[in-house]
Every structure is written in C-alpha cells, then in structure tokens.
Amino acid sequence: MGRSQGLRRDAGRGDEAGGGERPAPPGQDILKRLEQARDQLHTRGLDTRDTVLALYSGAGFDAALTDAAARDPRVLLVDLPMLYD
C-alpha cells in the first residue's frame, strides 16, 4: 500500500472517531512547547530575544493561555476575529 493511501485511510478513521466534534481550544501546553523550541534555538546560538510566539486558532483559546498571553507581550494569539477585522 502506498503512503498516501495509508494517510487517507487514517484521516478517515480520525474523522469518524472524532464524531464531528470541534477540537478543544489550544491551551498552555502548546505555548510551553513553543517556548521549549525557542529555548533550544537559543542554546544553539540563535538570538531569540525578540522572538514572538504566535498561536493561531479557529476555536479560540482557553482561559489560562489567554491570561498567559496578556502577561507576556512576546506571545501573540490570533483568532478568527483578529484575522477578519
């Protein structure tokens, strides 16, 4: 079986397993992963002082992530209203 055939089959299963429900809004776990990636780039010698961590979501963001972004100007949350206003 070719690789693309396996991907299509798996995607179909994922859709059925999800039951058509919307995904949960992104939370702080995603921000933590981005922070870790930024920190790894810094340890490799890249200047990350002015790096902005941007997160995009069509489902909004959870309250903890929104609070974290409000406290840190280097975190940008982009939702649908921001894109279309």
Image (spheres, rainbow, N blue to C red):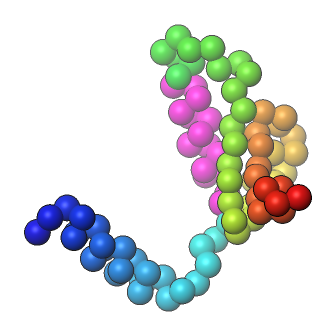
The quadrant of the rendering that contains the N terminus is bottom left
**Residue 85 sits in quarter:** bottom right
Q: Residue furthest left?
A: 1
Identified at 70% across, 68% down, the residue is 59
Q: Position of residue 48 (x, y in %)?
A: 65, 20
Q: Is residue 30 above or below residue 5?
A: above
Q: Is residue 41 above or below residue 16?
A: above
**Residue 58 sits in quarter:** bottom right
Going by the image, does 48 lie left or right of 6?
right
Going by the image, does 14 lie left or right of 50?
left
Q: Is residue 44 above or below residue 35?
A: above
Identified at 87% across, 40% down, the residue is 71
Identified at 53% across, 22% down, the residue is 41
Q: Position of residue 3 (x, y in %)?
A: 19, 61
Going by the image, does 67 lie left or right of 61?
right
Magenta-drawn segment? 26-40
Number of marks in picture: 0
Going by the image, does 37 lie left or right of 65?
left
Q: Position of residue 6 (x, y in %)?
A: 22, 69
